[in-house]
Protein backbone atom coordinates (compact mmCIF):
# COMPACT_ATOMS: atom_id res chain seq x y z
CA UNK A 1 0.00 0.00 0.00
CA UNK A 2 1.50 3.31 -1.10
CA UNK A 3 1.44 5.96 1.61
CA UNK A 4 0.34 9.06 -0.26
CA UNK A 5 -0.59 12.38 1.32
CA UNK A 6 -4.30 11.61 1.34
CA UNK A 7 -3.73 8.37 3.22
CA UNK A 8 -1.41 10.06 5.73
CA UNK A 9 -4.04 12.74 6.30
CA UNK A 10 -6.64 10.03 6.85
CA UNK A 11 -4.46 8.38 9.49
CA UNK A 12 -3.77 11.68 11.25
CA UNK A 13 -7.51 12.48 11.31
CA UNK A 14 -8.26 9.03 12.77
CA UNK A 15 -5.60 9.38 15.47
CA UNK A 16 -6.82 12.87 16.43
CA UNK A 17 -10.38 11.58 16.59
CA UNK A 18 -9.37 8.77 18.94
CA UNK A 19 -7.46 11.21 21.15
CA UNK A 20 -10.46 13.52 21.42
CA UNK A 21 -12.79 10.62 22.18
CA UNK A 22 -10.37 9.43 24.86
CA UNK A 23 -11.36 12.49 26.92
CA UNK A 24 -14.37 10.43 28.00
CA UNK A 25 -11.91 8.43 30.14
CA UNK A 26 -10.36 11.54 31.70
CA UNK A 27 -8.16 14.52 30.94
CA UNK A 28 -4.57 13.87 29.85
CA UNK A 29 -1.69 15.83 28.22
CA UNK A 30 -2.20 14.37 24.74
CA UNK A 31 -5.81 15.56 24.70
CA UNK A 32 -4.72 19.04 25.78
CA UNK A 33 -2.14 19.07 22.98
CA UNK A 34 -4.83 18.19 20.43
CA UNK A 35 -7.10 20.85 21.93
CA UNK A 36 -4.38 23.50 21.62
CA UNK A 37 -3.71 22.31 18.09
CA UNK A 38 -7.38 22.76 17.20
CA UNK A 39 -7.47 26.24 18.74
CA UNK A 40 -4.28 27.23 16.92
CA UNK A 41 -5.51 25.96 13.56
CA UNK A 42 -8.87 27.71 14.04
CA UNK A 43 -7.16 30.98 14.98
CA UNK A 44 -4.80 30.72 12.04
CA UNK A 45 -7.64 30.03 9.63
CA UNK A 46 -9.65 32.98 10.99
CA UNK A 47 -6.61 35.24 10.66
CA UNK A 48 -5.99 34.08 7.09
CA UNK A 49 -9.63 34.75 6.15
CA UNK A 50 -9.48 38.20 7.78
CA UNK A 51 -6.30 39.08 5.90
CA UNK A 52 -7.59 37.78 2.57
CA UNK A 53 -11.15 39.15 2.76
CA UNK A 54 -10.65 42.33 4.81
CA UNK A 55 -7.07 43.60 5.07
CA UNK A 56 -6.02 43.11 1.46
CA UNK A 57 -9.19 44.33 -0.34
CA UNK A 58 -9.98 47.11 2.15
CA UNK A 59 -6.50 48.46 2.88
CA UNK A 60 -3.59 47.02 0.91
CA UNK A 61 -5.12 47.03 -2.56
CA UNK A 62 -6.43 50.64 -2.27
CA UNK A 63 -2.97 51.81 -1.16
CA UNK A 64 -1.38 50.01 -4.13
CA UNK A 65 -3.94 51.63 -6.44
CA UNK A 66 -3.01 55.03 -5.05
CA UNK A 67 0.67 54.32 -5.69
CA UNK A 68 -0.09 53.14 -9.23
CA UNK A 69 -2.07 56.31 -9.98
CA UNK A 70 -5.28 54.28 -10.25
CA UNK A 71 -7.17 55.33 -7.13
CA UNK A 72 -10.13 53.18 -6.18
CA UNK A 73 -11.02 55.19 -3.06
CA UNK A 74 -11.23 58.77 -2.00
CA UNK A 75 -7.96 59.89 -0.43
CA UNK A 76 -9.72 61.06 2.76
CA UNK A 77 -11.49 57.71 3.17
CA UNK A 78 -8.23 55.86 2.63
CA UNK A 79 -6.56 58.07 5.23
CA UNK A 80 -9.27 57.26 7.76
CA UNK A 81 -8.81 53.54 7.15
CA UNK A 82 -5.04 53.75 7.58
CA UNK A 83 -5.44 55.84 10.73
CA UNK A 84 -7.85 53.33 12.29
CA UNK A 85 -5.50 50.47 11.47
CA UNK A 86 -2.55 52.28 13.04
CA UNK A 87 -4.64 53.02 16.15
CA UNK A 88 -5.59 49.35 16.45
CA UNK A 89 -1.96 48.30 16.07
CA UNK A 90 -1.15 50.61 18.96
CA UNK A 91 -3.06 48.21 21.22
CA UNK A 92 -0.21 45.73 20.83
CA UNK A 93 1.96 47.68 23.27
CA UNK A 94 0.86 48.57 26.82
CA UNK A 95 2.54 51.96 26.48
CA UNK A 96 0.50 52.97 23.44
CA UNK A 97 -2.66 50.98 24.20
CA UNK A 98 -4.64 54.12 25.01
CA UNK A 99 -4.19 55.39 21.46
CA UNK A 100 -6.20 52.44 20.20
CA UNK A 101 -9.18 53.04 22.48
CA UNK A 102 -11.11 55.22 19.99
CA UNK A 103 -10.81 52.61 17.24
CA UNK A 104 -11.75 49.84 19.67
CA UNK A 105 -14.74 51.85 20.88
CA UNK A 106 -15.81 52.38 17.29
CA UNK A 107 -15.64 48.66 16.60
CA UNK A 108 -17.58 47.85 19.77
CA UNK A 109 -20.23 50.49 19.02
CA UNK A 110 -20.72 49.38 15.43
CA UNK A 111 -20.84 45.73 16.51
CA UNK A 112 -23.42 46.48 19.20
CA UNK A 113 -25.52 48.49 16.77
CA UNK A 114 -25.45 45.68 14.23
CA UNK A 115 -26.37 43.15 16.93
CA UNK A 116 -29.29 45.24 18.17
CA UNK A 117 -30.48 45.95 14.63
CA UNK A 118 -30.19 42.29 13.70
CA UNK A 119 -32.10 41.23 16.80
CA UNK A 120 -34.84 43.76 16.11
CA UNK A 121 -35.22 42.92 12.41
CA UNK A 122 -34.55 39.19 12.69
CA UNK A 123 -36.32 38.32 15.93
CA UNK A 124 -38.48 40.99 17.55
CA UNK A 125 -40.29 42.34 14.48
CA UNK A 126 -40.94 38.88 12.95
CA UNK A 127 -42.21 37.67 16.34
CA UNK A 128 -44.57 40.65 16.59
CA UNK A 129 -45.79 40.01 13.06
CA UNK A 130 -46.27 36.32 13.77
CA UNK A 131 -48.19 37.08 16.96
CA UNK A 132 -50.35 39.65 15.17
CA UNK A 133 -51.12 37.25 12.34
CA UNK A 134 -51.61 34.20 14.53
CA UNK A 135 -55.39 34.60 14.45
CA UNK A 136 -55.90 33.39 10.88
CA UNK A 137 -59.54 34.39 10.50
CA UNK A 138 -59.65 33.25 6.88
CA UNK A 139 -58.76 29.70 7.91
CA UNK A 140 -61.13 29.94 10.86
CA UNK A 141 -64.07 31.04 8.70
CA UNK A 142 -63.30 28.41 6.07
CA UNK A 143 -63.13 25.62 8.67
CA UNK A 144 -66.21 26.86 10.53
CA UNK A 145 -68.33 27.20 7.41
CA UNK A 146 -67.22 23.76 6.25
CA UNK A 147 -68.32 22.18 9.49
CA UNK A 148 -64.79 21.49 10.73
CA UNK A 149 -65.38 22.97 14.15
CA UNK A 150 -62.41 21.32 15.83
CA UNK A 151 -60.04 22.75 13.20
CA UNK A 152 -61.58 26.19 13.67
CA UNK A 153 -61.16 26.00 17.44
CA UNK A 154 -57.57 24.83 16.94
CA UNK A 155 -56.80 27.96 14.88
CA UNK A 156 -58.07 30.22 17.67
CA UNK A 157 -56.31 28.16 20.35
CA UNK A 158 -52.97 28.33 18.51
CA UNK A 159 -53.32 32.09 18.20
CA UNK A 160 -54.09 32.51 21.89
CA UNK A 161 -51.11 30.35 22.92
CA UNK A 162 -48.74 32.23 20.62
CA UNK A 163 -49.85 35.67 21.82
CA UNK A 164 -49.79 34.57 25.45
CA UNK A 165 -46.30 33.10 25.07
CA UNK A 166 -45.01 36.28 23.44
CA UNK A 167 -46.51 38.63 26.00
CA UNK A 168 -45.55 36.53 29.03
CA UNK A 169 -41.98 36.09 27.81
CA UNK A 170 -41.61 39.84 27.41
CA UNK A 171 -43.14 40.32 30.86
CA UNK A 172 -40.50 38.00 32.30
CA UNK A 173 -37.85 40.62 31.51
CA UNK A 174 -39.92 43.54 32.81
CA UNK A 175 -38.82 44.57 36.28
CA UNK A 176 -40.64 47.86 36.67
CA UNK A 177 -39.44 50.87 38.63
CA UNK A 178 -37.38 50.71 41.80
CA UNK A 179 -38.64 52.82 44.69
CA UNK A 180 -36.29 54.82 46.85
CA UNK A 181 -34.65 52.90 49.63
CA UNK A 182 -35.52 49.52 48.16
CA UNK A 183 -33.31 47.24 46.12
CA UNK A 184 -35.97 44.90 44.76
CA UNK A 185 -37.99 45.99 41.72
CA UNK A 186 -41.71 46.56 42.08
CA UNK A 187 -44.09 44.61 39.87
CA UNK A 188 -47.81 44.25 40.20
CA UNK A 189 -49.59 40.93 40.48
CA UNK A 190 -50.52 40.77 36.80
CA UNK A 191 -46.94 41.27 35.64
CA UNK A 192 -45.70 38.72 38.19
CA UNK A 193 -48.21 36.16 36.94
CA UNK A 194 -47.27 36.78 33.32
CA UNK A 195 -43.58 36.64 34.24
CA UNK A 196 -44.07 33.25 35.91
CA UNK A 197 -45.82 31.95 32.80
CA UNK A 198 -43.09 33.49 30.64
CA UNK A 199 -40.48 31.56 32.63
CA UNK A 200 -42.38 28.38 31.76
CA UNK A 201 -42.28 29.18 28.04
CA UNK A 202 -38.60 30.14 28.28
CA UNK A 203 -37.86 26.79 29.92
CA UNK A 204 -39.60 25.01 27.05
CA UNK A 205 -37.59 27.01 24.49
CA UNK A 206 -34.30 26.29 26.27
CA UNK A 207 -35.17 22.60 26.50
CA UNK A 208 -35.85 22.52 22.76
CA UNK A 209 -32.53 24.29 22.06
CA UNK A 210 -30.67 21.91 24.36
CA UNK A 211 -32.22 18.89 22.69
CA UNK A 212 -31.20 20.28 19.30
CA UNK A 213 -27.61 20.75 20.50
CA UNK A 214 -27.61 17.24 21.94
CA UNK A 215 -28.90 15.75 18.70
CA UNK A 216 -26.25 17.65 16.75
CA UNK A 217 -23.55 16.34 19.09
CA UNK A 218 -24.85 12.78 18.74
CA UNK A 219 -24.87 13.19 14.97
CA UNK A 220 -21.24 14.34 15.05
CA UNK A 221 -20.33 11.39 17.28
CA UNK A 222 -22.01 8.91 14.94
CA UNK A 223 -20.22 10.47 11.97
CA UNK A 224 -16.82 10.18 13.73
CA UNK A 225 -17.46 6.56 14.72
CA UNK A 226 -18.42 5.75 11.16
CA UNK A 227 -15.24 7.48 9.97
CA UNK A 228 -13.15 5.37 12.32
CA UNK A 229 -14.90 2.20 11.14
CA UNK A 230 -14.25 3.06 7.49
CA UNK A 231 -10.61 3.92 8.24
CA UNK A 232 -10.09 0.64 10.08
CA UNK A 233 -11.65 -1.25 7.17
CA UNK A 234 -9.28 0.50 4.81
CA UNK A 235 -6.26 -0.40 6.93
CA UNK A 236 -7.33 -4.04 7.16
CA UNK A 237 -8.02 -4.18 3.44
CA UNK A 238 -11.67 -5.00 3.92
CA UNK A 239 -13.96 -4.26 0.93
Image (cartoon, grey):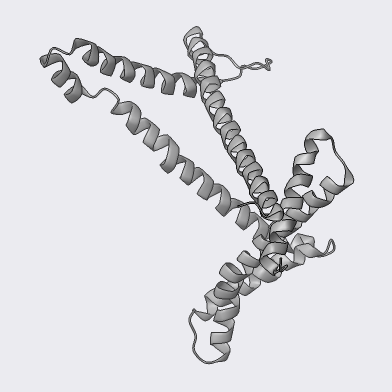
* 86 left or right, relative to 158: right
Percent from the top left, x then y, of residue 88?
Answer: 70, 65
Who's the residue at 49% across and 19% down the image?
201
Give the quadrant of residue 95.
bottom right
Residue 155 position (above or below residue 19): above
Residue extending farthest to the left is 145
Q: Is residue 7 visible?
A: yes
- Point 66% across, 69% down: residue: 85
| Relative image position of residue 217 (x, y in whole percent) | 62, 37
Task: Give the percent coordinates (x, y) of residue 234.
Answer: 66, 54
Q: Nearer the viewer, residue 61 or 43?
A: 43
Q: Is residue 16 above or below residue 99?
A: above
Of residues 74 and 205, the one nearer the viewer is: 205
The answer to which image quadrant residue 206 occupies is: top right
Establish if 20 lies above or below 166: below
Viewer-nearest residue: 213 or 110: 213
Q: Residue furthest bottom?
A: 69
Answer whether residue 176 is visible to the viewer in this image: no
Tell me the residue at 54%/18% (across/down): 199
Q: Quadrant of the N terminus?
A: bottom right
Say which quarter of the image contains residue 148: top left
Identify the residue at image location x=56%, y=24%: 207
Residue 126: give x, y in percent of width and height: 37, 36
Q: Locate residue 76 relative to residue 144 in the image: left or right.
A: right
Amino acid sequence: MVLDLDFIGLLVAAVLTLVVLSYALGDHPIFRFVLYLFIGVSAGYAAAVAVQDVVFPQLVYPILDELNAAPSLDLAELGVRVLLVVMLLAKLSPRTARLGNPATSLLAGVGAALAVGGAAQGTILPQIGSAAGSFDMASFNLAWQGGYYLEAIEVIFNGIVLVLATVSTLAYFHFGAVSRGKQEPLRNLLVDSLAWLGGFFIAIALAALFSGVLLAALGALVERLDFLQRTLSLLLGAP
